[in-house]
Image: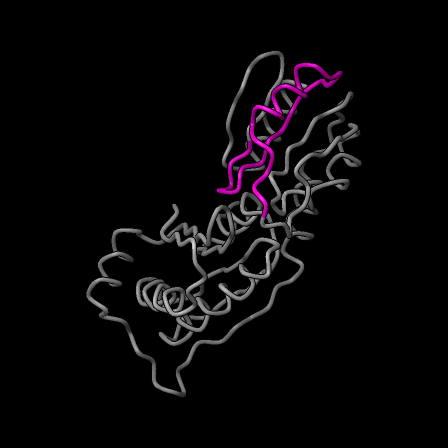
Amino acid sequence: MEVYYSQRFNPEELALLGRAIGTISHGTIIVGRDGRAISRYGKRAMVVGIVSTGSTIMDVRLIPLIALKDFAHRKGLPLAYVYYYGGVRVYVSGIDSDEIGAIMESKSFIEAQPNDIGATVYYPNALDDFLHEVFKYYNFRVEGKALVDAMNTPAVLFFPRMSDHFGFEVELINDMMTSYLPPKPKEVFMHKLQKGEYDFGLRFRPEGIVEFYKDGEELEFGSMWKLLDHMRKNL
């Protein structure tokens, strides 16, 4: 769930948000970000707040949100993800958003003693490990060509590894994951999909949802595992 949005970059607010997240979870939290510099710095500010409560950070750095959701679910850990889409946004899972709001309002944060400040564990290979696990489980082949709208998110990092493994051709649009320009609208994707010679389409939204298109049908998935289950049965 999205718990923060600001058109401006405000590291103080992100640090306070981190303090609220750390106060509630008070354990290990997985954090990640998209490809913009503002998200990298925003994540750093949020992490300062989290570790100030004594919570530990597993920092997976740059990763598509939909992959991080699956990764964190299998680890059984909460996540916090900083990304840019018309402003700075923070998505959390495994943490009660109402509690975050209440802690932010009351400012009743846990304050760790200096020797109890939380640690940061870096896990830069999280996406590689996620894809390795996916490819080990799924070994079907998909024929044909797909139009993929990455919506200027790190979902572009799925390719060409995913298309190579499953055997389909990909044409990417909105593949500039470091750009602050808004992605071309959905209408452009739909027009191209309908007019071109594509067997199916994928559209990766910034909030960690993927849309699947085939033969006029549109479905949404919040997990890569669920998407691939559907592709295995229907392609």
Is 173 displayed left or right of 99 in the figure? Answer: right
Is residue 208 on the magenta stretch? yes
In which quadrant of the rendered image does the N terminus lie?
top left
Q: Position of residue 198 (x, y in %)?
A: 73, 19
Position of 205 relative to 231 (above/below): below
Position of 206 relative to 117 (above/below): above
Residue bounds of the magenta highlight: 181-210
Position of 77 relative to 157 (above/below): below
Q: Position of residue 20 (x, y in %)?
A: 32, 65
Residue found at x 25% / y 51%: 98
* Residue 33 picture quarter: bottom right
Q: Position of residue 78 (x, y in %)?
A: 43, 55
In which quadrant of the rendered image does the C terminus lie?
top right
Front in this rendered view, residue 226 or 146: 146
Q: Position of residue 81 (x, y in %)?
A: 48, 55
Is residue 189 on the magenta stretch? yes
Scheme by which the image is coloured: one colour
Q: Residue furthest bottom?
A: 115
Residue found at x 62% / y 26%: 189
Is 168 displayed left or right of 230 in the figure? Answer: right
Position of 7 relative to 186 (above/below): below
